[in-house]
Amino acid sequence: MDESDRCILNALQGGFPLCERPFAQVAKDLGFAEEELIARIRAMLEEGSLTRFGPLYNAERMGGAFTLCAMRVPPEAFERVAAIVNARPEVAHNYEREHALNMWFVLAIAEPACVAAVVRDIERQSGCVVLQLPKLDEYFVELKLAV
Amino acid sequence: MNDPLDRRIISATQAGLPLVPEPYRAVADQLGVAQEEVLQRMQRMLDDGRIRRIGVVPNHYAIGYVANGMSVWNVDDARIAELGAAVGALTFVSHCYRRPRRPPDWPYNLFAMIHGRDRAEVYTNVAAISALLDTASSGHDVLYSTRILKKTGLRFG
C-alpha cells in the first residue's frame, strides 16, 4: 500500500457518490484518472487491505436481528468449532479473542424469531454454550480509521 | 420498508459494487431496471439510514491497526445513557453499545471498541475511558482480537 492507496482509504470510508460515473467524480477530487482509481481499489481488495467496497447496510433498519454471541471454546476444539460456526450463512463475522470467552461472532438473521433456533443448532453441533449479547442501545457507530 | 426491488438491489450489492466505470448501471442491467431507478432507491436507503455509508471497508489489520481492543465496562444502569454517549463521542472509539449482562459469566453492559496501532495506544485510551467513567464503572476488561475467523458483508441468512 502506497501514499495514493492511503489517500483513497482515508477519503473513501464513506461518501462514494450515487451518480452515473462515481469513480470519475471521486478520481477527479483525489487527482487520479478514473481507471487508476478502479485499479487501485481492485488491487487493495485482492491483497486484502480492503475487505469490501460498496454500500454498508444497516441490519436493524432492514428489520433483521443482529446479535453478538460469545462462546468459551476449549483450545483443542477451537478449529473444529470455528469451522462449524463459520459454515453458517447467518454468521456475518467471527473473531478469536484473548479471553476465557474466546470466540465472538455476529448473527445476522432476517427473521428475529429464528435466532433461538440457530443458536440451539450451533450449541448442539459445537457442544459449547452460546452467550447472546444483543445490542440494547447504540451510542456511536462510525469507522474513522486514519492511515 | 423494503419492497421487492429494494431487496433485489440489496442482494445484488451487499457483497460489493462492480468495479466498472458505471457500477450502478451494471447493477441496473443485472436486475433489468433503469439506472435511474437504482440510483433513486439507493439514495432513499442512504437518506433513511438503511445504508450507513458507501465506500471502502478497510481490513484494520492490513492497514496497521493490529491492536483491536474490545473494552467492556460494568456501568451503573442509572447513568449508562449519559455515559455511553460520552464514551461513544471519544474520537478513538469506533463502536459503542449497551448490551445485557449475563452473570455470572459476563458482568459487563457497555462495549466500546478501540482500534490502535499497538497495545500501548489502546491501553492509553482505556485509561481515558476509565477516568471518564470514574466511580460509575465497577469493573472492566479489554479483549484483544487475535484472528479474524470470518468476515463477510452483511447477508441475512
Image: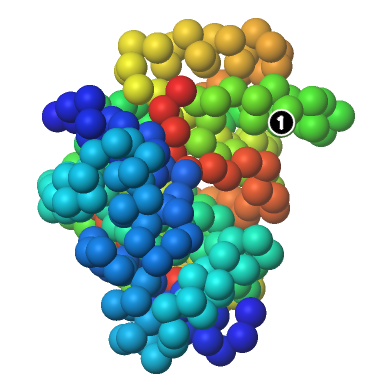
| Residue tagged 1 | A82
Q: Nearer the viewer, residue A55 or B31?
A: B31
Horizontal arrangement in the rendering, residue A89 relative to residue B96 (left or right): right
Residue visible at 52% across and 64% down in the picture: B58
Q: Nearer the viewer, residue B51 or A103?
A: B51
Circle 1: element type: helix
Is residue A42 in view from this perspective?
A: yes
Q: Disc 1 marks which amino acid? A: Ala
Horizontal arrangement in the rendering, residue A34 relative to residue A71 (left or right): left
Residue visible at 28% across and 31% down in the picture: B7
The subunit letter for the residue under badge 1 reads: A
Q: From the viewer's perspective, is residue B15 above or below residue B136?
A: above
If the image is split into quadrants, where does the N terminus of chain B sit?
A: top left
Which percent across, then down, holds residue B5? 23, 31
Q: Nearer the viewer, residue B96 or B139?
A: B96
Which percent across, then down, holds residue A36? 51, 80
Could you say which quadrant of the image residue A46 lies in? bottom right
Q: Residue furthest right?
A: A76
- The chosen color scheme is rainbow
Residue visible at 47% across and 29% down in the picture: A107
Which percent across, then down, holds residue B109? 37, 40
Picture mark count: 1
Residue visible at 40% across and 24% down in the picture: A109
Q: From the viewer's perspective, is residue B49 above or below residue B157?
A: below
Could you say which quadrant of the image residue A135 lies in? top left
- Mark 1 Cα within 10 Å, few/some/many (few <14, many 20+)? some
Is residue B73 in view from this perspective?
A: no
Which percent across, then down, holds residue B147? 69, 50
